[in-house]
Image: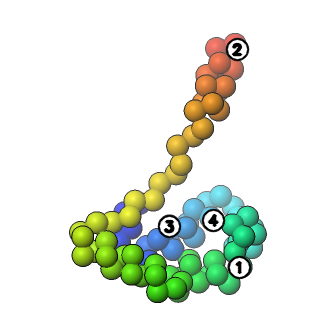
Amino acid sequence: MYTRSAQDLGAVAREKREALGLTQQQVADRARVSREWLVNFESAKVGVSLFRVFDVLQVLQLALDVSDRAPDPHNVLDDVFADLER
């Protein structure tokens, strides 16, 4: 997703969390942050530093791209070999 603001980034995080079927508390616990912090992040109410990052990116005509992590190559190879054995 193309992200141009703290609001966009928070929305991406919220949408991904919901798609994974996780509650805010579950994500907060796993990330070792408070639920309140996560609520603020998803609502783009986090500290000033995040907004400054986006301000700089805007000046540079850049955007932050958020995407799923690439799968672990070892797991992919395990899947390929498992398919070959079938």
Around disc 4, counting alpha carbons within 10 Å, would you say few (fewer than 14), some (14 to 19), or many (20 or more)? few
Task: Write down the quadrant of residue 1 in the picture.
Answer: bottom left
Looking at marks 3 and 1 on the same chain, the residue that comes earlier in the sequence is marked by 3
Looking at marks 2 and 3 on the same chain, the residue that comes earlier in the sequence is marked by 3
86 or 7, nearer to the observer: 7
**Disc 2, disc 3: CB below 8 Å?**
no
Quote the CA–CA distance across marks 2 and 1. 45 Å
Q: What residue lies at 50% left-to-right and 67% top-to-bottom? A: 12
Write down the residue under mark 3.
12
* Mark 3: secondary structure: helix
- Residue 45, x across and y down, in percent: 53, 86
* Mark 1: secondary structure: helix
Write down the residue under mark 1.
35
Callout 2, which amino acid?
A: Arg
Around disc 1, counting alpha carbons within 10 Å, would you say few (fewer than 14), some (14 to 19), or many (20 or more)? some
Quote the CA–CA distance across marks 2 and 3. 38 Å
Around disc 3, counting alpha carbons within 10 Å, would you say few (fewer than 14), some (14 to 19), or many (20 or more)? some
Q: What residue lies at 68% left-to-right and 84% top-to-bottom? A: 36
Q: Nearer the viewer, mark 3 or mark 4?
A: 3
Q: Classify 30 as above or below 85.
A: below
Write down the residue under mark 2.
86
Quote the CA–CA distance across marks 3 and 1. 17 Å
Quote the CA–CA distance across marks 3 and 4. 10 Å
- Lateral position of residue 49 relative to residue 72, left or right: left
Q: Classify 74 as above or below 14.
A: above
Task: Write down the quadrant of residue 85 in the picture.
Answer: top right
Q: Which mark is drawn over residue 18? A: 4
Quote the CA–CA distance across marks 2 and 4. 35 Å
